[in-house]
Image (spheres, grey):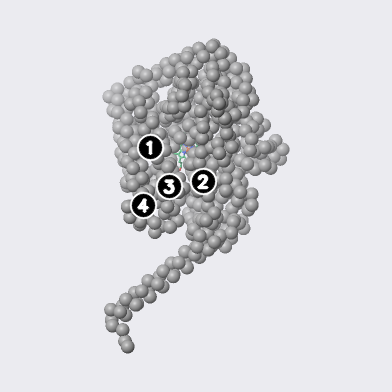
Amino acid sequence: MSQSLPHRLLATSLLGAGVLAVFLLVRWVLGTLRPKGFPPGPPIIPGLGNLHQMPIQKPYLKFHQWAKQHGDIVGLKAGTGNLVLLNTPAWVHELFDKRGAICSDRPVNHILTKHVFSGPEEKSIAILQYDEYYRRWRKSFQFILGPAGIKRLLPLLESEAASLCRKFIDSSSSSDYEQSLRHWALAVPLVATTGERLSDMPADYADKLCHSQEELLSVLLPGAAPPVDIFPVLKHVPEILAGWKAKARQVRKLLCDDADNYLVGAKKTYAQIERDPESVGFDSLLPKIMKEQAAAWDKDKFTETELAYVGQAAVGAAVDTTLATFKNLMVAFAAFPDKLVKAQEELDRVAGDEPLSGERIGELVYLKACVSEVLRWRPTTPQALPHVLTRDEHVGEYFFPKGTMFIANAWTIHRNEEEYEQPHDFIPERFLDNPFGLRPSVAAADENLENSGRRALYAFGSGRRQCPGEQFAFTSVLLAAAKVVWAYDILVPPGGRFDVSVETGFKDGTVTEPVHPEVVFQARSEKKRAGVLADAQRTQDIARDLLGLEF
Ligand code: HEM
């Protein structure tokens, strides 16, 4: 019996849909297989790749195991995506430096690009693709983060470091500690970006900004949202079933408000400069760009919204990372008092009876080694941010398809037992032997070490996307540590216990920081206590003169 036309149409459509579904399924499954010439890695399951083995927490620990099993370069399949771990400086140099022009894109993160930074001019430099537009953003940061910028900021950094040190005289609770640190980490990025001083802001300003940043990082945690970049169909789940969409919208609102605040603050500073240039003694980033743009015919100007987000990026990227690094250092000093004593001896020798002034910070060789070591031992960002390849590329025996994501695996690089003596231990002395912290025999064996593209620290990433705030962050932490170590013994809280195991003593998340960061600061003598008070006043006076405003 022949079928009616509608039945035939229905059957044909069903058949077509079935063929399409099979085609898509086969394409998906084939996409999850390891490409020919891909680096070695754990076995995959067709249809999943290595997804079933991808760790939700502290991924760098699993990456380290894979590096031990499979070698210097490890290829993984995240569904159909290609993910490659670069476990040695040589591999990082090969891809991120030598091939920087084709290996500096970022993965497209649907949640960030479509839900958080979703307006046409709402951007975050850290996720921009590597093109002319990105380079304009990156260049703009140079003004505050380049060597000249840091030199200009030094008195402000010193004043905030001294003021932090001053607060530890009175601090009694862990919430005081957290608040003091937030104030310290935010104050200089804020004035450097907008010209506004944190002390002029409402009391909860620092808390609000830090909250937005925490919320931003929380939407990025594995498990916070389904893996929409791996299974794009999940993007279309209606909002009622996809709580992450509402959460991302909330985060967007917080960031928009912050960005607006930076713009409003910068406009105020700019208006003040226009009215009375002499009254503003310090050039900050956004007002400077506004001034230049007003005077130029340049077609590539930042819009107001873009400027607001330049401010958001500059302040946002600075605070959590610097804060976490300082907390890690304080915990290391409390946990390893012999290292603290050595740092104190150096400060007593170099600084004497008064806290060291900022210009002499370069003389603190041992303390500098301690800051380097804490960034090696507990890298604040252990797997940095991924870089993406923009075309197919062969390197030696390996083939990497366009779109491959690379991770410079800082955790593993800094744990190579052949290169580092007792890599799991906190040993600042390793950075006294050579600037890379390597075993002396390894450093001596490589005459070309300085020019090999090797970096001392991989916590700041590498290549063209390498953190532009490295010097700023390092100087901030070093200065604050110099003031604190000179003045205080840093102790484990009474009845407390310091767990420095990476598995249990440090938080999971985008930045690595202690689960219990609280330490006790005990003034080393009455004289030093008086020195702390005098130093806070002295440096504040200098900063006030520099800014040319009431403090
Ligand atoms: C200890 C503190 C810090 C650590 C550990 C850190 C770490 C990193 C890492 C790993 C990256 C990605 C690098 C890559 O893709 O290869 C990055 C990017 C970035 N960092 Fe930092 N950072 C710190 C402090 C700062 C500070 C103080 C600022 C600014 C004031 C800053 C601004 C940025 C920006 C704007 C980017 C994006 C760069 C790009 O995509 O081109 N960072 N940071």
Q: Is mark 2 within 8 Å of ligand 1?
A: no
Instruction: Examine the rendered structure and indicate whether residue 193 appears above or below residue 119.
Output: above
Mark 4 neighbour density, 10 Å: few (under 14) some (14–19) many (20 or more) = some
The amino acid marked with disc number 2 is Gln
Of 551 and 222, which appears nearest the observer? 222
Q: Are marks 3 and 4 in contact (CB under 8 Å)?
A: no
Q: Mark 4 or mark 2, which has the lower sequence index?
A: 2
Q: Is mark 4 within 8 Å of ligand 1?
A: no
Task: Mark yes or no: residue 184 visible.
Answer: no
Point out residue 117 in the picture as x, y percentages from the top left corner: 36, 45
SS for callout 1: helix
Q: Is residue 241 left or right of residue 470?
A: left
Q: Mark 4 or mark 1, which has the lower sequence index?
A: 1
The amino acid marked with disc number 4 is Ala
Q: Name the residue: 43% across, 47% down.
A: 224
Point out residue 253 in the picture as x, y percentages from the top left corner: 32, 41
Q: Name the residue: 28% across, 78% down.
A: 6
Task: Mark yes or no: residue 218 visible.
Answer: yes
For discs 2 and 1, the disc positioned in front in the rendered view: 2
SS for callout 4: loop
Residue on which disc 4 sits = 242
Q: Are marks 2 and 1 in contact (CB under 8 Å)?
A: no
Q: Is residue 430 left or right of residue 542?
A: right
Residue on which disc 1 sits = 212
Point out residue 30 in the picture as x, y percentages from the top left corner: 50, 65
Q: Mark 2 or mark 3, which has the lower sequence index?
A: 2
Q: Is mark 3 within 8 Å of ligand 1?
A: no
Residue on which disc 3 sits = 224
